Image (spheres, coloured by chain):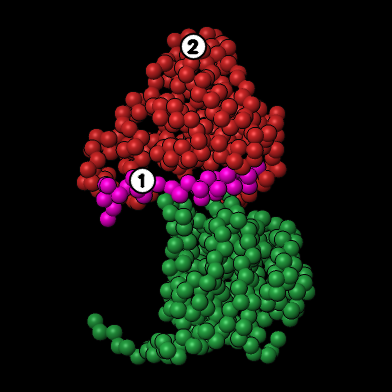
Chain colours: A red, B green
Amino acid sequence: MIRKDEVAGRLKLNEALAVAALADFLRDGVENADSTGLVLGLSGGVDSALAAALAVRALGTERVHAFYLPYRASDPQSAVDAAAVAAKLGLALTTLDITPQVDAYFDRVDPGADRVRRGNKMARERMSILFDQSKRHGALVTGTSNKSEILLGYSTVFGDNASSLNPIGDLYKQQVWQLSRFLGVPEQIVAKPPSADLWPGQTSEGELGFEYAMADEVLYLMFDQGLTADEVVDRGYPEAVVARIVQLERTNRFKRRLMLIARLSNSAINLDREIPRD
Amino acid sequence: MTERRSKIKVGLAQIDARLGDLEFNLAHHLEWFGQAQAEGVELLLFPELSLTGYRLLHLTPRVAIHPATSPIVQRLREAAPGMAVVVGCVEEDDNGALYNSALLLAGGEITHVHRKLYLPTYGIFQEGRFFSEGRKLRMAKLFGNPFGVLICEDFWHSDPAEKLARHGAKLIGIVSASPGRIGPDAMPPSQEAWESLTRASALLNTSWIVYCGRVGWEEGTFYTGGSHIVRPGGELLARAPYLEEHLLTAEIDLREADRLRWRLPILADERSDIEWVE
């Protein structure tokens, strides 16, 4: 059985093959949809930087439309980093401040709303803009959620987890780091603590209560290899972290199966009739 | 065509397919016919379900054909009567049952039909829901020589290839649409598995093994490519690149299998009379 010290090695990817396959996925997706290109939001973080780098690999710079969509409380460093990614890839970057529409909603409806609701609204506002821009350009929205956060449910449903196609959704966070370095994403972006940047000082690892490097290994052992929580703990992972990961994975499954349809006929969409979208 | 000869120029057309689009795929096959003819190919293999794409799900019945009367097959038959060609299709029999089949076309005729024996229905595979199992294994003829044709999962069970070899096949062709995976090494793990099987089979069955895979994406899965030819005894003769369309050609000599069988008569030594004792 797999030992703890083997797990990190098993999560390593052959970079050239992985990048070639993922770029091909984006090219194929655009072609199949008779689409002109890809739209994506650059947040200044590593996930969207990798997605953008793959998009440029797939289609070149002209057909990739990049947006930076800050809120007034966004970390100023995010703007610097988003610009650095765009510059590195040769992408034009459009900045649209989402503060007016987010604040207008809460000022009018519920000035006392907490930061989680406000954060979710920001994520959905960004989604809404990206899908509008996708219609404008006849392009597809590129997903920027990785496997770790999808499994942990660390995303806003119909917000940052919404996309037309997602090249990085089967990559654990450390695989995102690995491919990002391979593709020359600036080190300041790969090395900084992951953050959804929805309020000042927010970090993903602070909010989740564990580090991605460990979470990836626990998720790999449970989700990919089918080990039980006890078997994972036996390999030397902290019990409290494993328990928390089990709970997050379980309670957030609804975010991974979005179209839950009540079946009355014998031809319900996706249940009885699985028609591939290709 | 009936004259028996031992040297055969083999071509493996490692192509992509457009899911559910017979006309497009037919035209694509014909393009590759042209290239194969230019290279003097005498036996040309296409991947599993090459005329329809693989992950059809509920599209399966919509692309089913009766090979004997299908205009699509007719055009393939007429296109290169001098070349023996293996193509993959959804075959509908007279009772309306659907099979994942490989057709051998030669001299303007369908000279052999192999219906996939083992239908993977686990993990991402759902073939058992949409296809009926083939129940018969027959020998095909290739320029007067016995020739074995198997489809993908048929080769993950040792019996069919062994039966073919024991009944005289010195060349076994495997056509496949095997979803790929990427790991740490330059050879994808999915292809490591395939080459382990093809090389072991070439040794145990003292036969030529040619493996034709495909490339491209269907929804979220990709196909690796890496089609290859293994000499009797297990030495790799040639391998196509990963992730790109390619025509891999090589001349093979069936006498190599005879020569190996003279010094390594393990097939002839096979026994079926060993008594199992509880």
B56 shown above or below B204: above
Instruction: Give the answer, above or below, for where B226 lies relative to A108.
Output: below
Looking at the picture, how far across and down is residue A49, in whole percent? 52, 32
**Left or right side of A272 for B199:** left
The percent position of residue A56, horizontal first and vertical second, equals 60, 37
Q: On residue A12, which mark appears?
A: none
- Residue B46 visible somewhere in the drawing: yes
Dominant SS in magenta: helix
Q: Which mark is residue A220?
A: 1
Any magenta on residue A20? yes
> Range of the magenta residues?
A1-30
Give the crowd class for mark 2: few <14, some 14-19, many >=20 residues within 10 Å: few
Name the side, left or right, on which A267 lies relative to B68: left
Q: Amino acid at mark 1?
A: Tyr
Element type at mark 2: loop
Question: Residue at coordinates 55% horizontally, 13% vertically from top-left?
Answer: A99
**Upstream in sequence: badge 1 or badge 2:** 2
Position of B153 relative to A103 (above/below): below
Kindly report the distance in space between the C-alpha atoms of the residues bearing marks 1 and 2: 41 Å
Residue B34 to residue A257: above or below: below
Crowding near pointer 1: few (<14 within 10 Å), some, many (20+)? some
In the picture, which quadrant includes the N terminus of chain A? Answer: bottom left
Could you tell me if residue B131 is visible in this image? no
**Of discs 1 and 2, which sits in the foreground?**
1
- What residue lies at 44% left-to-right and 64% top-to-bottom? B193
Q: Which one is nearer the viewer's eye here, A104 or B9?
A: B9
Residue B218: x and y in percent read 59, 52
For the point 50% across and 56% down, which residue is it? B180
| Subunit bearing disc 2 | A
Residue labelled with disc 2: A110
